[in-house]
Amino acid sequence: MKSDIEIARESALRPIGEIAAKLGLKEEEIEQYGKYKAKVNKKPTQAKGKLILVTAINPTPLGEGKTTVSIGLADAFTLMGKNCCLALREPSLGPVFGIKGGATGGGYSQVLPMEDINLHFTGDLHAITAANNLLAALIDNHIKFGNEKRIKTITFRRAMDMNERSLRKIVLCAKGGADGEPHEGGFDITAASEVMTTLCLAESMTDLKKRLASIIVGYDEEGAAVTAGDLGAQEAMAILLKDAIKPNLVQTIGGTPALIHGGPFANIAHGCNSVIATKTALSLSDITVTEAGFGADLGAEKFLDIKCRKAGLKPAAVVLVATVRALKYNGGVDKTALTGEDIPALERGIVNLGAHIENLTKVFGVPLVVSINKFGTDTDAEIACVQKYCAEKGVTAVVNECFAKGGVGATALAQEVLNAAQKTYELHYTYELTDPLKVKIEKVATRIYGAKDVTFSEGAAAKLEAAEKQGFGSFPVCIAKTQYSLSPDQKALGRPTGFTFPVTDVTVRGGAGFVVVECGSVMLMPGLPKEPNAYKMTIDEDGVINGLS
């Protein structure tokens, strides 16, 4: 089969004005970035469409095609004559040049122009990086010139959109003297920046400035929080974000409009595209397909407990993506040997799928459809095994072949999703906002992850107590853990039970409006693998890129 970039390059692109017209957008309501990209310059109005969430089981290191399924499902709706719009996250350059490659789907279910979206796109991540680093500079400058706010501890870090492990911990002002007092600092990848999460949860420029002002940059000598607003930084930061706050409009191979906007990681942030993009899509289309990062234990939980609750959203149905290879991986098969039929391993690992089904249907109560993202190596017996298991759980599992066939390969899934979306239900949450922060953490760990109990390090316990006293107790919790397991141990595959969930650190993110709860060592700045994807990529004299996947 052709590579993703070859398929993308051979696909016919429509002028972006034609794509905008499908959503009823007028010429003056978009700002074109060339022929095939645009910013939407129209504020969302009342939602008229249904929201479909795509999530997944715990993945293999290469992912299970959740974005591909989202795109294929949207194209299937378009083929069925539905007015559909996608709302997805933007790729980060770190993974593009690292281990994962691009994040624009795969095969015949991609968003286009693939090269532009995966690389600099419309500059949103660069603007977020600049706003982040402007605040970091203003903090050090404030301390240099008298430290009026008596900042004792700086918690805010710099950012860059690249995997660079050597910048995780650095010494600033190393020479001292005129540069300022030496102190420790570091870089996070831009997708982990609080400016990213703040932008993605803001609903307007006014709301964005209010949220930016609430970002905690450090603590004073009495332990009180010092914010970006205390330094007067929010207006300048918002100026850098004036274009980044607007959703980006592109298209799928099948011609479905796609709003791609924002890109916080799901294992260390809330992992969803922007609220503005989601609400814009809902106000312009009859069906909006969106996704939540990584497995449902991270992505869907945060989408429902944080994004939906804060933004007043409610999905009409949820699609849970599963693959035979990921289930065998969860059953103990090495990632290099997932192609041969192995029913015993599949049966061992399928409990991971069961955990996610139960969480979504019993904890949250959402109408659910399982999508089996079919690979060429899957056997009929393996597919039948998964479908039988899902039927026993009371959920329909539909084979999806959108990678190889585009929207046509997802029409059966689309019809089943439409059926599920007709159901009425009451959305439940894992915890109440009135619960103490410790209780919220315990409920997520026990109800969603399956932990037996939760332990708190001395430092984490102290920070939680301080957060309660400072008025942050009503915030939702955003738990940072590995995406490869329901447990904190990425090697504990399947459906681990009886484990203890260790809370090692806590950070209040005032701009995002949630409390980040770290479990173990969570990398806010990833490193490159031994053979990064960067080595596989080339560009010729005419600017044609190869090796981007």
Image: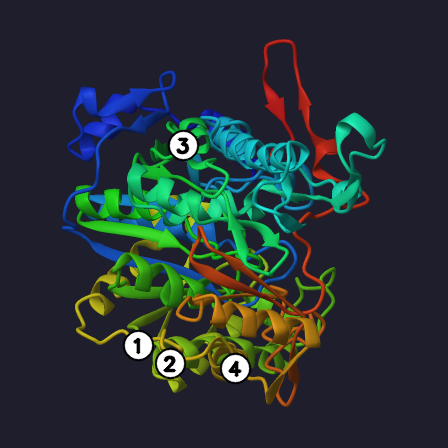
User: Mark 4 = which residue?
Assistant: 442
Looking at the image, do the residues carrying marks 1 and 2 touch, with CB atoms under 8 Å apart? yes
Label 4, label 1: how many angstroms apart (C-alpha)? 17 Å
Is residue 164 rendered to the left or right of residue 349? right
Quadrant of the snapshot with the C terminus = top right
User: Mark 2 = which residue?
Assistant: 363
Dot 1 amino acid type: His
Q: Quadrant of residue 435?
A: bottom left
Q: Position of residue 267 (x, y in %)?
A: 57, 59
Q: Quadrant of residue 518?
A: bottom right
Label 3, label 2: how many angstroms apart (C-alpha)? 41 Å
Q: Residues within 10 Å of mark 2 (few under 14, many from 20)?
A: some
Residue closest to the eye, 525 or 63: 525
Dot 3 amino acid type: Glu
- SS assignment at label 3: helix
Label 1, label 2: how many angstroms apart (C-alpha)? 7 Å
Q: Position of residue 381 (x, y in %)?
A: 53, 74
The reply to whether residue 110 is visible in this rendering is yes
Dot 2 amino acid type: Val
Looking at the image, do the residues carrying marks 4 and 1 touch, with CB atoms under 8 Å apart? no
N-terminal label among 3 and 2: 3
Label 1 vs label 3, nearer the camera: 3
Q: Residue at x 69, y 76 (%)?
A: 457
Q: Position of residue 483 (x, y in %)?
A: 60, 64
Label 3 vs label 2, nearer the camera: 3
User: Mark 1 = which residue?
Assistant: 428
Q: Residue at x 55, y 84 (%)?
A: 450
User: Mark 3 = which residue?
Assistant: 235
Looking at the image, do the residues carrying marks 3 and 4 touch, with CB atoms under 8 Å apart? no
